[in-house]
Structure formats: structure tokens, C-alpha cells
Image: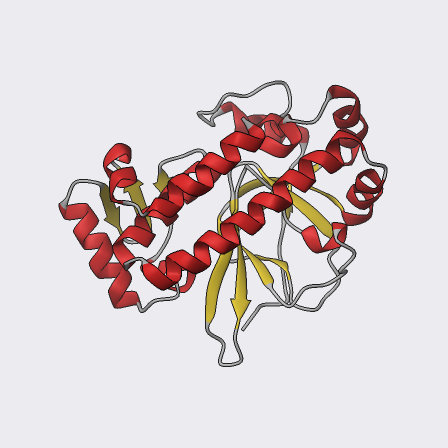
Amino acid sequence: MYVRTAYITVLSWRQTKEVFDVMPTHQEAHPHSLNRLLANLPSQELTALLPHLEQVSLSHGQPIILPYEPIPFVYFPLNSLLSLVTVLEDGSTVEARAIGREGMSSLPILLDAGTTPMQTVTQIPGQALRVKAEIIKEAFDKGGALRHIIHRYIHTTLVVASQTAACNRFHRVEARLCRWLLMSSDGIGKEDLFLTHDFLATMLGVRRAGVSEAASQLQSQGLIRYQRGRIQIVDRKGLETSACECYEAVKAEYVRLFG
């Protein structure tokens, strides 16, 4: 099931500055530098886009795109993580793709699809820059660097979808959990992940008991530390070693295309 009501907090520039003053990240003059797609734009195209970017605060579980409904905005996560999920008739869901600071939401707008049967929700709360869908569509249709960057990003989404399908079919839950935690950490630029086991089970498409068992094993190995609603990566190298091959395959493609 999905929720139709969304509450988004739009931050003033002063509030924006306060938020990013305490974020342990490599900032430049504007928070757009935290999103890989925006950071790769040449100055001329970025300057034209900046007046249309609005920073918002996203809460956990907040719907960004609803199935079969018009898509009004495109979101560029800064330190939040969005989740693209498939919702079945019985209300069960499984994650198809996560969207962090390496990407953007609302690709159907740029592919002339208009709507999508899939739902996008906020998986990890935080900040994002949003822009009206028609603004991005107009800039995309003009060509230039934005189109080339988004084309490369669309390619990576296909790689992720393919790798995830194989991962869900052939790899054990513990290795998949390692991959998912690493990708989520990369997506928000932090190693503290505020997530419940119920939500992890939904994202991995397994029973909660399976997630709890896998997380317990990772904690006993000294790779993570978890308590209710929070997972902290303690040994990243060890977690990478325990993850399935899918993490490195996807990461290598991002590095190849975006540096």
C-alpha cells in the first residue's frame, strides 16, 4: 500500500546554511556539490538551473512518486536516500533501486512516460534539492551536458536493476545485506544508517527474522553495530569483503562514468 499525503519541509537559505554547517562533508559554496549529477554539470548549465533548485527536508517513509500519478518534481538527494519499490496486490513491496547523492528521481519524466507503476519513497531522511519536472525536461530536451550526464545515469540504473535481480536470485541474505548497507552508506555519505529491521526486510524482500539473523551475524563479526532503528558500519573493509560481487560491479560502473 502507499500513502497519498506527503509533507515536505522547504528550508530557507539560513536554515540550509545551518544544516550544512554541521554536515561532515566536502562542501562548496552551494549544496548542489553534494549531488554527483549536479556537481558534474559545467558552470554555464548549472548557473541556469540553480535559481530553480529548492532545498527540502525529507522524512522517513515519505512518498516522492505515487504509482500512476503525475510526477511534479525531480529530486536530487544530498544526504537522503530514496527507494524505488514495486508494490504488489497484497501490499507487499520489494526494492528495485536506491537513489542517493549519486543520482536523481523521476526518470519517467525524461523518458516521455509521464507516470510509472512503481513507487518512490524516502528510505533515509535528509536533505534534497528539488526542481519542477518541466524545468528539467526542458533543459534535458535542449541537449548539452545535462542530457549526456543523465544518459549515463540511466545506463547505471539499468546496470543496478540487472545486478539486483541476479543478487536477489543467487546470493545469500547476509551478503545482500552487506551490499545494501554499503550502497546506502555511499548514497548518503555517512556510515550511520537509521533503519529498522522491518524496513530492511521490505527493501531486501525477505522476512524480518532473516534480516535480524543476518545483522546479528555481521555484528558478531565486528562489521556493524546496531540497535533499534540504527545501524553503524564499524569495519567497512570487512563489510566489503563479506558483500557479494554485486557491490563492486555496480560501484566500478559509477566510477567509470562519473569518476
Q: Position of residue 206 (x, y in %)?
A: 34, 67
Residue 22 coordinates in the image, percent (x, y): 47, 26
Look at the picture and state if 48 lies above or below 210. Answer: above
- Residue 201 is situated, as x and y percent measured from the top left of the image, at 36, 63
Left or right relative to 70: residue 204: left
- Is residue 192 visible in the rendered structure shown here? yes
Query: Is residue 35 in sight in this rendering?
Result: no
Is residue 139 shown above or below 33? below
**Residue at coordinates 72% horizontally, 66% vertically from top-left?**
69
Give percent across and percent down for residue 116. 68, 64
Q: Quadrant of the C terminus?
A: top right
Drawn side of residue 155 relative to residue 228, left or right: right
For residue 14, above or below residue 142: above
Q: Please tell me which residue is depicted at 33% across the width and 60% down the height of the picture.
A: 170
Q: Residue at x 35, y 56 (%)?
A: 196
* Residue situated in front as seen by the camera: 44 or 163: 163
The quadrant of the picture occupied by the N terminus is bottom right
- Figure check: 245 above or below 45: below
Q: Quadrant of residue 53?
A: top right
Q: Viewed as shown, does residue 53 lie left or right of 15?
A: right
